[in-house]
Structure formats: C-alpha cells, structure tokens
Amino acid sequence: MLSKGLKRKREEEEEKESLAVDALWLDPGHAAVAQAPPAAASSSLFDLSVLKLHHSLQQSEPDLRHLVLVVNTLRRIQASMAPAAALPPVPSPPAAPSMADNLLASSDAALSASMASLLEDLSHIEGLSQAPQPLADEGPPGRSMGGAAPSLGALDLLGPATGCLLDDGLEGLFEDIDTSMYDNELWAPASEGLKPGPEDEPGKEEAPELDEAELDYLMDVLVGTQALERPPGPGR
Amino acid sequence: LPSSWDYRRVPNAWLTFVGSDIISTVEFNHTGELLATGDKGGRVVIFQREQESKNQIHRRGEYNVYSTFQSHEPEFDYLKSLEIEEKINKIRWLPQQNAAYFLLSTNDKTVKLWKVSERDKRPEGYNLKDEEGRLRDPATITTLRVPVLRPMDLMVEATPRRVFANAHTYHINSISVNSDYETYMSADDLRINLWNFEITNQSFNIVDIKPANMEELTEVITAAEFHPHHCNTFVYSSSKGTIRLCDMRASALCDRHTKFFEEPEDPSNRSFFSEIISSISDVKFSHSGRYIMTRDYLTVKVWDLNMENRPIETYQVHDYLRSKLCSLYENDCIFDKFECVWNGSDSVIMTGSYNNFFRMFDRNTKRDVTLEASRENSKPRAILKPRKVCVGGKRRKDEISVDSLDFSKKILHTAWHPSENIIAVAATNNLYIFQDKVN
C-alpha cells in the first residue's frame, strides 16, 4: 500500500534478514560497537535506528510507542554525532557501514517515494475532513509534559554524504501519521469533542461537515461501486 | 508466605491449548475463584478452582476450564485499510454482585463487557412449541399447561452485554475498573477515556497528551490504573519513565497532574538507551492504595504516593542485561513489556524475565528468588528449584550463563491470587499455576 509499484530490492531483504539473525545474540565486544572508535559505534547505531524507523513506518499502523522511542533514540545519537557531522562517515569497519549506507541510500528513495505516495493518498481525505484541532485553551498538553522537544535542525547538518533522511528533517517522518486520517469527521470517535460537565449540552451532535457529493466521491474512490445513502449517525 | 520459597506445580494445572495462541493477559477475579486468560487469537479461557471436598482433598486448589469463548474477532477498517488485531490486551474482572460473573476484555480498539453465567435448568412444556422446538399449529392446542423448569447438565454461557467501540484512535493498552463499580477507564497511547458501564455510545476524555502537531510527539501513555479505594484518583505511566497521579475532581480534563513521580537519571548509567529502558511497561497500585509499583526494562520500583522525587524501593530484575542493551535493541527485545503484580498482603512483588524465568521480591526480608516455568524442569508436585544466572567467571553446576538465555521465552504476564499464595504464570502459549506447599 505504501510503495506504489516500488519493489523492495532483494539485497535489502537479505541484508535485513542477516542483520536480524546475527543480532540475535551479539557478542558485547562487537566490533562496530565496542572496539571501534565511538564515532563508528554511533554511526552504526544510527543506521540501525534508521532501519528500525523505516520498518516501523512501513507498518500500516505503526506501534506509536516503538516509533517514539526509536525516534528519540535517533535524536540522541544524532546529537552526539553532531560535532562530526561535517565529515563523511567513518569507513571502519568497512563492511557494515557501507552496506548500511547503500541500504540507507536505497531506503531513502523508497522511504521518500512511499511517503510521497501516502501523502498523496491522504490529500483526498484530508481535503474532505475538517478534523477539529485541540481547543486552544487546553494548550498542547504534549508539550507541558517532560522537557521541550529537542531541536531537529541539527539533522540538516548531515549533508548528502551521510544521507539526509528527508528534506525537512525528522519532523517529516511523522507526516504520514497524519491524524486527519484518524480524526476523519466521517467516523468521529465517540469521545471527540465531548467534554464532561454537569450541564451537558443536550443533543450535541457530532455531525460531519461533509455533503453528499463529497461522500459519494469518497466512497467511489474507495469502493468504486455504490455511494452511501446517508452518513451514519453518532450512535450507530 | 513461608520462610522458604516452596512453590509446587499444581497437577494438570498447566495447560497447553490445542492449536494454541500466545497468552496475552492473565487475571484472577476478586475472590480468586476464577482465573481468566486472553490470547492472541481473541479467545478468553476462564478457569475455576475446584471446591474443597473432604473426599478429594488432593484435588483442592486445582483450576479447571470453566468457560471458553471468542471475545474479539479480527476486524478490517475499510476506510483506513487497516486490520484490527483480535489479540486480547487486557482482561479486568468486575466484583461479583449476583450469581453471574462479569469481566471486561479489550483488544486494540474495542472494549467488551462479558457476562458469564451458569445454566442448570431448562424450561419444558411449552404450549406453542413441541419438544423439538417446532412451532405447533395453534388450532391443534386444546389445553394449556404451565412450563416447568427441569434440571439439565451444567452449561456455562458467556454473552456480550456491552460493546464500547469507536472511542480510541490509538491502541488501547490498559483498562481499569473504578472502585465505584459504575465506571471504568480505557487508555491508549495518547488518550484516556472514562466510561459508564451502562452507556456505550459515549465516553468522557479525561487525559489527552496528543500534541497539536504530531511531529512534536515525544512521549506516549503506557499504562493506567484507578486507585483501589478513591474513585476520583488514577495514575498513568509514560514512555519517559514518569508517573502522573490525577484527581478527577480537579478538572474535567486531567491534563494537569496532581502528583508527578520521576526518578532523576543516574549519570553513571547514561547511554543511548536510557530512555527506552526507563519506559514504564506496567503500573499497579498496592492493595492498600498507599504505594504504586512500576516496571521498566531492568527494574521494578515501589513508590510511596507521598514522595514524588524517587521510589522508596528499587529491585533489579535482570541487571546482567545492562551490558547487552545494544544487542537487545537490535533484536527488539528491549521493547518487551513486562507486567508486575503484588501479592494479597503487598509484602511480595513478582515479575517476569527471559528464559521462562520469573522473579519474586520480598519487601520485608529483602530476599528474592528466580524460578522457572517449564515443563522439563518441574515435575508435578515437585518443589520449584530456584535458578541462578551466572554473570561471569566460573559457572556453577546449576547456573545458567547469560549468553545461554533464551530470549524468545519471555514471561510478560503473571497474576497472584488475591488472598492466597497461588500464582499464574503465562509462558508464551502455556499457562502454569503454582501453589505454595503450605496449602
């Protein structure tokens, strides 16, 4: 669904498989991790994390916790690599990073292509839905928790030599988890917009702002056959 | 708890389900009479404890299958082109209020209330139906009779009484029944909703940590639970190793916590993986309500509700893994979510590990033990032998070296009887029930 007409390269699959098998029980003194200079260790961890991220994003519904933890780890690694970011990647040990770089380069293309096509798919639905944003007075609760999100601008320091993930850095990675798809008014979750209180607005409807023509178009796109007769009510 | 850790495997109590699925949740009910398991295939199996009987005293304490039913089916969300897994993430019992039993079971998206009841009589002597159930021609009926109830073989039926759907955009990780027995909460990665058992088409959102821009997402909710006695209080844990205690009386949307529990990071242990291993996978109130217990990747911590800046107790579950974090990150084991449980008196805590090991910590004596749930290594009625992991140097005869541990055999789900020393341990697709030899 994500990669329209883009086949994963066979080497990619084999590489991934061999990584997984080898990694099942790694000697703690693994060359890339312990004995190599720290820059190489960070680099291989970075590559591994990018691989995990790619794999996670390819799921139709990524595990959010796994995704967030991997992204945060990537940020840490990338922050520690920042001083060396101007240099090309350390070539030792030669085998693993260069293969990983190839992987990264090819996965770059696949990732960009897959995300581009996903965004294209979403743009239909995004145009139709008027997903309510969280109320301004509630503030962005995510930010009041924990520390501020670290600056991602540093990712741009990694030039083409190391393979810039996306044009707009890590922020773009979350674009395909466009919540307008989840928060599509057409199938509004029961809790959206409902706030408790002694005086509940009676009869407050979660009626979608879609008209029949747009619904028809949507259904045609998805199903290609009959159109909806009427949108489903909230209490179905 | 006896001074020595003697747990015997109750005969025929470990069961491998035919065509079995991986067990994904285990929970005793409030009396301990029933034990429910949920599995990856959406099935719930309930075990019932054998009644005490003078004639069969050796059978006392055995759990046998009481009811099996399909709780959730795989669903396909056509709009998003997503398959919704039928795996049961959590089961929570309601306290018993009449002859029937009620439990909540949930998958990633939908919570269901199930009623489990017994039927041992059936009506006979209908007027409009014959004995096979075929309709009779009313014109042929000349006399009326009153149907009577006749005994029949005991049948246990499970019926879905409520379906609470369409309220979670993200994956549900926790459900918790409130002490008022009228409401419960369901928590997903970013939101927590409050439900009334009687109302299925509406829920109240009480926590929402979704940022305005998803690119700013750095933290998710990992577990949530109501206070056992105060129906206005609940806690939820996060992927950053923090716990927030909230009071629903303070505001409708509990985005501002009442208490915030976080231990400062140990600078000597800092690594790229610090955050991942601090992610809390389970949070449980003690039965007393005075403490909370949290499980992260390497430790179990006990917190006093009155002290927010650090836990009062920290127990190392498998610290020998600290030097292996890179490999465990590579094979994704570092993301495994272990649960933890209190015993009935809050004096002992238990949690699982790898190689089918599970650990118990006595909070009073500070003693701990490692036991193994495995058919090969435990004979019926034999006392479980404590296990030991050798971290380096010479390995003793019965010890296992860290490099020999089987990381595919993980014990994520365990349960402790509410008042007795009976424990249930789920090892992949096998359920083990162990009992203290004193019984």
Image (cartoon, coloured by chain):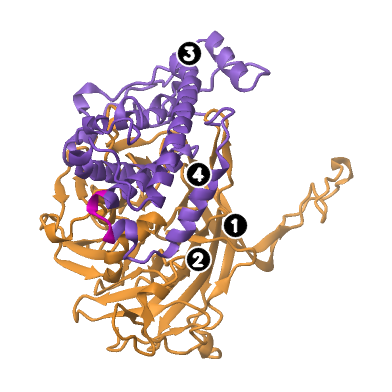
Chain colours: A purple, B orange
Q: Disc 1 or 2, which lies upstream in sequence?
A: 1
Residue B428 image label: 2
Which circle, 3 or 1, is nearer the viewer?
3
Q: Is residue A7 left or right of residue A234?
A: right
| Residue named by callout 1 | B69
User: Which of the pair B234/B384 is nearer the observer?
Assistant: B384
Magenta stretch? A35-39
Asked whether the beta carbons under mark 1 and mark 2 sit within 8 Å of each other, the answer is no
Q: Is residue B376 left or right of residue B91?
A: right
Vertical side of A109 occupied by B125: above or below: below
**Does A213 lie within the magenta span?**
no
Instruction: Indicate the secondary structure of the residue bearing disc 3.
Output: loop
- What's under tag 1, amino acid-wise? Phe
Q: Chain of mark 1?
A: B
At horizontal 15% and vertical 62% (from top left) the residue drawn is: B311
Q: Disc 4 or 2, which lies upstream in sequence?
A: 4
Q: Quadrant of the N terminus of chain B?
A: bottom left
Instruction: Indicate the secondary structure of the residue bearing disc 4.
Output: strand
Instruction: Indicate the secondary structure of the residue bearing disc 2.
Output: loop
At horizontal 26% and vertical 54% (from top left) the residue drawn is: B273
Residue B162 image label: 4
Asked whether the beta carbons under mark 3 and mark 4 sit within 8 Å of each other, the answer is no
Q: CA distance from mark 4 to mark 2?
A: 30 Å
Which circle, 1 or 2, is nearer the viewer?
2
- What's under tag 4, amino acid-wise? Arg
Q: Disc 4 or 1, which lies upstream in sequence?
A: 1
Residue A210 image label: 3
